[in-house]
């Protein structure tokens, strides 16, 4: 006789209706009331969070920009400031970094 190992196993006492079902339904109804209280608290907490992309037009940002140092150069391809040790090529007075020439 072939056995289907993927089929769910059935026991002899599974055919009977469990008597615990009404108790579980009653417990579920009492838990629903408690979960509503939790949702209300979460909603109050969510109001205090700032989401990404929020309107920051009233905020002022102060940034200190440092001038280029003696041991740095600006890549003519990606326009990033790099250390002089990353110079890979120089063409017509323009410097290119190792990442752009790689």
Image: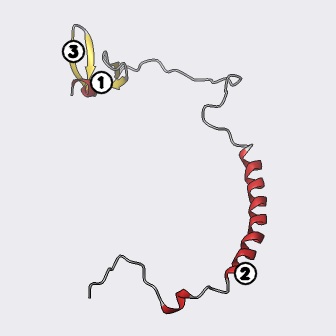
Q: Is residue 23 left or right of residue 6?
A: right
Number of numbered callouts drawn: 3
The C terminus is located in which quarter?
Answer: top left
According to the image, label 3 marks what residue? 90
Is 91 located above or below residue 12 in the figure? above
The CA distance from mark 1 to mark 3 is 12 Å
Q: Residues within 10 Å of mark 2 (few under 14, many from 20)?
A: few
Residue drawn at (64%, 38%), measured in percent from left and top? 51
Is 74 located above or below residue 37 in the figure? above
Select label 2 or label 3 by which is in front. 2
Q: Earlier in the sequence, mark 2 or mark 3?
A: 2
Q: Earlier in the sequence, mark 1 or mark 3?
A: 1
The residue nearer to you, when weighing 9 against 87, is: 9
Percent across and percent down for residue 42 are: 73, 53
In the structure shown, which secondary structural element does the residue marked by tag 2 occupy? helix
Q: Which mark is residue 84?
A: 1
Residue drawn at (72%, 80%), measured in percent from left and top? 22
In the structure shown, which secondary structural element does the residue marked by tag 1 occupy? helix
According to the image, label 2 marks what residue? 23
The residue nearer to you, when weighing 22 against 41, is: 22
The CA distance from mark 2 to mark 3 is 81 Å
């Amino acid at each position: 006789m072939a056995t289907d190992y993927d089929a769910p196993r059935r026991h002899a006492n599974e055919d009977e209706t469990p008597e615990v079902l009404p108790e579980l339904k009653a417990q579920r109804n009492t838990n629903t009331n408690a979960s509503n209280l939790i949702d209300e608290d979460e909603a109050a907490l969510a109001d205090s969070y700032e989401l990404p992309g929020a309107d920051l037009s009233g905020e002022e940002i102060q940034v200190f920009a440092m001038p280029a140092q003696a041991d740095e150069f600006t890549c003519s391809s990606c326009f990033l400031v790099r250390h002089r040790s990353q110079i890979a090529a120089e063409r017509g007075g323009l410097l290119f970094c190792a990442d752009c020439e790689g």
